[in-house]
Image (spheres, rainbow, N blue to C red):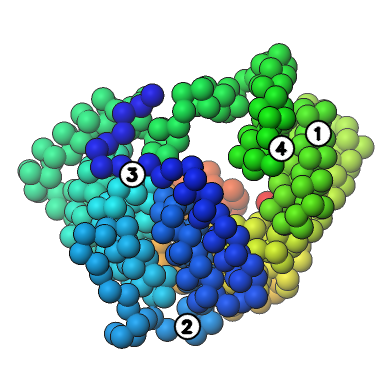
């Protein structure tokens, strides 16, 4: 079992179960749109299980939605008071302030340092990642914030993350020899930790019971024989039979059935989940059924795509694949719509819903969905590009240009895959608008970064061959992907 840094606080299983009671109530409250009360309920649950990262994510998502609807930060007299010696309570106080003002980087920093003092190291890594990305998005990132992040990651022995931060610190101060020396030490620590605890994974997982760890490792193997899968399922079935009311046993059985990726076992999982859904009316069980369906659809798509690729001249096969793909997108869209209806704060489901609308060429429906998802920092840049492309496909050329130019202004890196993509589609929008000179300039920048990117060479040649003042023909949009 991997060594855990000193100070980490393992949360007893009984406390995790107590927390889940509050989390379930909070989800019910959130569905009514009362986000402030829901945040309070989640924080009460986090008092029992402060290392529930998925709950921290939900609290932040609700804070972002609340802010988008005009919610204000906590006033001076509303802010929770700090309690000397109670690090967990202080961490949750900082989290509440961060939820009410999700863009405030000082609150993020206080939340992260509070989690460090409270021994909640998984929480440290999560909010640290949010703070790191927020700092990168600034026109002038804060060197001091990077330093705090680097020191914090080192404190929990996550040297790979610390080294990533150090890279940006060195770019800001390339002549600083002390930074260069520290970077070498970080690289050495990272090398020693790679392959073990320090290379990733959650702290909570690293201290679980050894037997459970071995079973989970078998579940996560990329290559599984039927005998291994059957043995694991049998073990989980026997464990579940001892106490069918134990939700932890139930979840382990479902996961073992799902991991087999075999229809027989997946149907058994669906049967169990449907029964649990009928008994409890809790949507999370229906959501698990949908996840199995999504997995099955992906396997079918993979199989058909491979067959079509092997037989490129078989037109019937290509038509069958195209028809299946459309049916797949339609089915997935219904699933994600249902998920969003039951979990309005699930930005991942909302993002996937928008992507399916885009792939089905339902651009007018996709646009407002992408506008909502763009409020989530996790998806902001990716969704901004999709939003610009959706505007373009829907015929709103000016809006496409504005959106994609906003993406360019907000993305500091130049020459990577994402910046190339933004420039390419912004050039396409400018081409559609008839601004040939600006379009050529952007296509040229794409070619300088990646000469073989899509059809950029042909576009530049065609536009440069166009007579001055000649009306530009509509650009042919690339197929949706």
Element at label 3: loop
Q: How many angstroms separate mark 4 from mark 1 (CA)?
A: 15 Å
Q: Nearer the viewer, residue 272 or 441?
A: 272
Q: Which residue is mark 1?
A: 268
Q: In this rendering, does residue 354 appear at all?
A: no
Name above or below for residue 238 compared with residue 100.
Answer: above
Residue 365 sits in quarter: bottom right
Residues under labels 4 and 3: Cα distance? 30 Å
Classify mark 2: helix, strand or loop: loop
Which disc, if any, is residue 244?
4
Q: Earlier in the sequence, mark 1 or mark 3?
A: 3
Give the Cα separation between the discs numbered 4 and 2: 43 Å
Q: Which residue is mark 2?
A: 71
Residue bearing the label numbered 3: 9
Sequence order check, earlier mark of 4 and 3 = 3
Q: Quadrant of the N terminus?
A: top left
Nearer to us: label 1 or label 3: 3
Mark closest to the chain's N terminus, 4 or 1 = 4
């Amino acid at each position: 079992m991997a060594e855990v840094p000193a100070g980490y606080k393992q949360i007893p299983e009984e406390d995790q179960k107590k927390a889940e009671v509050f989390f379930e109530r909070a989800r019910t409250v959130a569905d009514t749109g009362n986000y402030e009360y829901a945040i309070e309920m989640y924080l009460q649950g986090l008092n029992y299980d402060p290392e529930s990262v998925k709950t921290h994510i939900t609290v932040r998502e609700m804070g972002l939605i609340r802010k988008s609807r005009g919610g204000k930060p906590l006033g001076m007299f509303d802010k929770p008071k700090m309690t000397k010696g109670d690090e967990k309570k202080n961490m949750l106080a900082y989290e509440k302030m961060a939820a009410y003002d999700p863009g405030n980087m000082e609150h993020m920093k206080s939340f992260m340092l509070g989690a460090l003092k409270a021994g909640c190291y998984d929480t440290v890594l999560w909010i640290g990642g949010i703070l790191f990305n927020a700092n990168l998005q600034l026109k002038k990132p804060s060197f001091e914030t990077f330093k705090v992040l680097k020191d914090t990651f080192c404190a929990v022995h996550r040297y790979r993350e610390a080294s990533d931060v150090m890279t940006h610190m060195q770019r800001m101060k390339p002549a600083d020899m002390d930074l260069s020396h520290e970077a070498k030490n970080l690289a050495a620590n990272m090398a020693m930790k790679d392959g073990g605890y320090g290379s990733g994974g959650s702290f909570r997982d690293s201290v679980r019971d050894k037997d459970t760890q071995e079973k989970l490792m078998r579940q996560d193997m990329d290559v599984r024989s039927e005998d291994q899968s059957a043995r694991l399922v049998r073990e989980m079935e026997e464990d579940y039979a001892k106490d069918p009311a134990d939700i932890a046993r139930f979840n382990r059985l479902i996961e073992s059935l799902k991991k087999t990726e075999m229809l027989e076992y997946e149907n058994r999982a669906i049967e169990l989940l449907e029964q649990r859904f009928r008994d409890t009316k809790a949507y999370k069980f229906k959501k698990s059924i949908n996840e199995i369906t999504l997995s099955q659809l992906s396997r079918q798509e993979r199989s058909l795509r491979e067959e079509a690729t092997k037989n490129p001249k078989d037109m019937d096969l290509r038509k069958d694949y195209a028809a299946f793909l459309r049916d797949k997108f339609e089915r997935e869209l219904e699933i994600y719509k249902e998920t969003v209806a039951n979990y309005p704060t699930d930005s991942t489901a909302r993002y996937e819903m928008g992507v399916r609308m885009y792939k089905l060429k339902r651009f007018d429906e996709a646009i407002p969905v992408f506008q909502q998802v763009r409020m989530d920092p996790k998806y902001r840049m990716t969704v901004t590009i999709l939003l610009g492309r959706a505007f373009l496909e829907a015929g709103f050329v000016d809006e496409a240009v504005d959106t994609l130019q906003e993406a360019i202004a907000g993305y500091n890196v130049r020459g990577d895959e994402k910046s190339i993509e933004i420039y390419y589609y912004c050039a396409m929008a400018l081409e559609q608008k008839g601004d040939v000179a600006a379009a050529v300039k952007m296509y040229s920048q794409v070619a300088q970064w990646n000469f073989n990117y899509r059809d950029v060479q042909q576009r530049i040649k065609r536009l440069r061959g166009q007579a001055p003042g000649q009306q530009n023909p509509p650009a042919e949009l690339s197929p949706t992907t």
